[in-house]
Image (cartoon, rainbow, N blue to C red):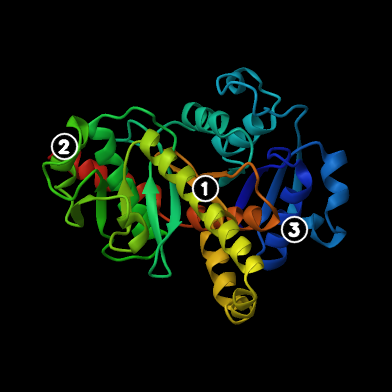
Amino acid sequence: MIRVAIDAMGGDFGPEPLVAGIVAALESKKFSALLVGNSKIIKPLIPTNLLKYIEFIEASEAISMEDGATEALKRKESTIFKAVDLVKNGLADAVVSAGHSGATMSLATLRLGRLKGVSRPAIATLMPNSKSSSTLVLDVGANVDCKSEHLFQFAVMGEAYAKEILKRNTPKIGLLSNGEEKSKGNEVSKEAYELISKLDNFTGNAEGGQVFDGSVDVVVCDGFIGNILLKTSEGVAEAITKIIKQEVKRSPMAIAGSVLMKKVFSRLKKQISYDEYGGAPLLGVNGCVIISHGKSNAKAMKNAIFQAINFADSNINKVIEQELSKHIKS
C-alpha cells in the first residue's frame, strides 16, 4: 500500500479542507495516510472507519506564508520538515503539501537530494488546452534564472513525466519563446534550442498560444516566465468567468441562452480549475513531492493525493536518470 505523508496544517484555510480531501481520497482509493500536524485538531475531523488507514505524526509548528523559505531548514519541528523527512527516511513514498511552496522546494531539494544528472529540480503543472486535454509546463516557479543545460534537463524530465504518468507515447516538446523560428529568443533559449534538438520529440520553439491549443504536450521555460504564464492564465480564466456572469445578468436573451449553455459552462469551469489537477510535482528530486495550491479545497487535496500515488507507483525517477545519462555520455 502506497504511503503518503501529508502536511495537514499547511494551506491558507487551515486543516479542515485538507482533511476533507484526505477523507474523500481514502473513500475512493485505499492508501496509508501519514498526517503531520496537531492530532488533537486533525483526528476529530476523520470518520472512525477510516482511522485504520491513518497514522498521526505530531508536529508543533507550521511554516507560515510570511516566513522565508530558508527558515524551514532550521525548524525541525515544523509540519513540512517532518513530512519531507518521512520520505527521506523511507517511511513514506510521497509527500503532499499545500503550505509554503518555497519551503517545500528547499527542504525537498536539500533533504531528499537531486536525481543523478539533475542540476535544478523543476515544478511541473498541467494547463488545459482546447483539445480537451492538458499541456505540461515546466518550470513554473522553482528557478527564476536558468542556464541552457537546465532547460534541457527540464525537457527530459517533462518528456519522462508525459510518458510515464500521462501515458503519451510520443509527447511533443516545445521550447517557449517569442516566435516559432529557430532564430527567435534570448541567448539562453537559443543555446537551449540546440541542446533540446537532441530529443527525437522536440518540435522547436513554441509561442504562448501553443500552451493552450494542444499542438504540443510539454512546454519548457524557466521558472520566472513559467510562473508569470501560470498566474496570468489563472487570472484570465477568472476574468472570463466573471465577464460571462456579468453579461448574462444584463441581457434577458443571455439568461435564456445561459440555461442552454449550462453544461458547456460547467465543463469549461472544470477544465480550467486548478482543483482538477490538485498539485504540481517537483521533478528532479530523489522522491515524490507534490506541491499543492495554498487555496486548495477538498477536491484539490484529493486530486493531489491521487497524483502522489500515481507518481510513487511509477518508474519516472529511474526513467529520468536513464534518459539524462544517455546525453551525459554523449
**Can you tell which quarter of the image residue 68 is in?**
top right
Measured in 3D between alpha carbons, the distance from the residue under mark 1 to the one under mark 3, in whole angstroms, is 30 Å
Q: Amino acid at mark 3?
A: Val
Question: Is 108 situated above or below 196?
Answer: above
Task: Give the numbered dot on residue 119.
Answer: none
Residue 328 placed where, x, y %? 19, 37
Does the CB distance between marks 3 and 2 fall below 8 Å?
no
Residue denoted by label 3:
23
Measured in 3D between alpha carbons, the distance from the residue under mark 3 to the one under mark 2, in whole angstroms, is 48 Å
In terms of sequence position, does the residue under pointer 1 or pointer 2 come before the other? 2
Q: Residue at x 33, y 63 (%)?
A: 214
Q: In the image, 4: left or right of 313?
A: right
Q: What secondary structure is found at the residue carrying circle 2?
A: helix
Residue denoted by label 2:
190
Residue 271 placed where, x, y %? 52, 64
**Can you tell which quarter of the image residue 78 is in?**
top right
In terms of sequence position, does the residue under pointer 3 or pointer 2 come before the other? 3
Question: Is 276 situated above or below 77?
Answer: below
Q: Quadrant of the N terminus?
A: bottom right
Question: Is 112 situated above or below 178?
Answer: above
Measured in 3D between alpha carbons, the distance from the residue under mark 1 to the one under mark 2, in whole angstroms, is 30 Å
Q: Residue at x 42, y 59 (%)?
A: 165
Q: What secondary structure is found at the residue carrying circle 3?
A: helix
Residue denoted by label 1:
235
Residue 11 visible in this rendered orientation of the protein: yes
Does the CB distance between marks 1 and 2 fall below 8 Å?
no
Residue 115 placed where, x, y %? 37, 37
